[in-house]
Image: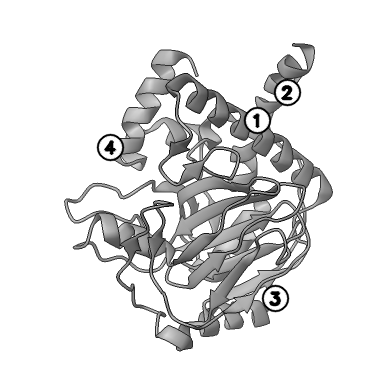
Amino acid sequence: MGCEHQLKTQRNLPYTGSMEYQVPTASVDEYHETGFTILPSVIDADTLEMLREESAYFVGYTDAVMDARGIEVMGITHRGKRYFISNRYRSSTRISSFLFGPLMAEITTSFLGDTVYLFNEQWVVKGADQGMKFAWHQDSGYVKTFDPDTTHPPYLTCWCALDDMTEANGTISVLPHDVLGTRNRILDHRREEETNDLVGYRGKESGELITMRAGSVAVFSSTTMHRSGPNTTDGQRRVYLAQYSASPLTSSNGDLWSQAVPFMKQGELVHSKKDDLDESTVSPRIGKSMHAERANGD
């Protein structure tokens, strides 16, 4: 009980870790050419430890929710095998400080320009020994599948490795833009019944396997085709994924698709706590969730 209370107390304190870093021009060029690049070992040790603690908290929270509902599968989350846990930063000051901190400011403005919005954030965790694969897809494929008439410019994914990423523990593979012509093109995706995954490619290309050390960030476009393998190791494979856009992304009916929380404007930090609670910066779906959590005291 004491340790649990201590963690909750820590989670309400702002994260103070910082790191001076400048994205290399070669990495920006590679991203625009291929659709992805790797920024090696840019997250410092204290930040890594904080993100791992938060990961453990939210995986435990998700297990408790599934226990209460008597279910083993929730969307594309499969208990003990893989977890996709989205839109939780408002309940942790430490995560908020990382999402809107100097490292992410440098990374996002380098690839998107001087104006940046938070679009989405989630934990992607594969369980030990039984961590499931994830099929070939474009992140924008999920947007198009649920809203076929929407059009949007590619957004930015920052795939933050909390563990060393290897073939054995289910790292990602990517297909450069020129393989399938995906620079500004979203392919049709079809649902895979046994996993609920949306599959955007079923061809023979194996892609480029991305291996990297914990603390590295894989940066890729939302139109970049990628997949991940199963985790066959005895430890979790943990990733914190933050997605940003250069402008608010809206659905065909005019509602926000996910979030559009202001982060940077004309190269200056503009995020404030009140933006996190402003329902005009989130989709109606997320707004309802925020109401429910306040009602439940969560």
- From the viewer's perspective, is 23 left or right of 223? right
**Tag shown at residue 24:** 3
- Residue 103 visible in this rendered orientation of the protein: yes
Quarter holding residue 288:
top left
* Front label number (3 vs 2): 2
The residue carrying mark 4 is 284
- Could you tell me if the residues under marks 2 and 1 are in contact, i.e. CB atoms within 8 Å? yes
Name the amino acid, label 3. Answer: Pro
* Element class at badge 2: helix
Task: Answer with mark 3 or mark 2, whichever residue precedes in sequence.
Answer: 2
What is the x, y in percent for residue 141?
Answer: 36, 64
Please name which of the two marks, 1 or 3, marks the residue nearer to the observer.
Answer: 1
Q: Residue at x 48, y 14 (%)?
A: 297
Q: Secondary structure at mark 4?
A: helix
| Residue corresponding to mark 1 | 57
- Mark 1 surroundings within 10 Å by alpha-carbon count, few (fewer than 14), some (14 through 19), many (20 or more): some
Q: Secondary structure at mark 1?
A: helix
Disc 3 crowd, CA 10 A, few/some/many (<14, 14-19, 20+): few
Distance CA(mark 4)–CA(mark 2): 31 Å
The quarter of the rendered structure image containing the N terminus is top right
- Compare marks 2 and 1 and give the one earlier in the sequence: 2
* Mark carried by residue 7: 2
Q: Is label 4 in contact with label 2 (beta carbons under 8 Å)?
A: no
Of 190 and 57, nearer the camera is 190
What distance separates the C-alpha of mark 2 from that of mark 1?
Answer: 9 Å
Q: CA distance from mark 1 to mark 3?
A: 34 Å
Q: In this rendering, would 98 be left or right of 262?
A: right
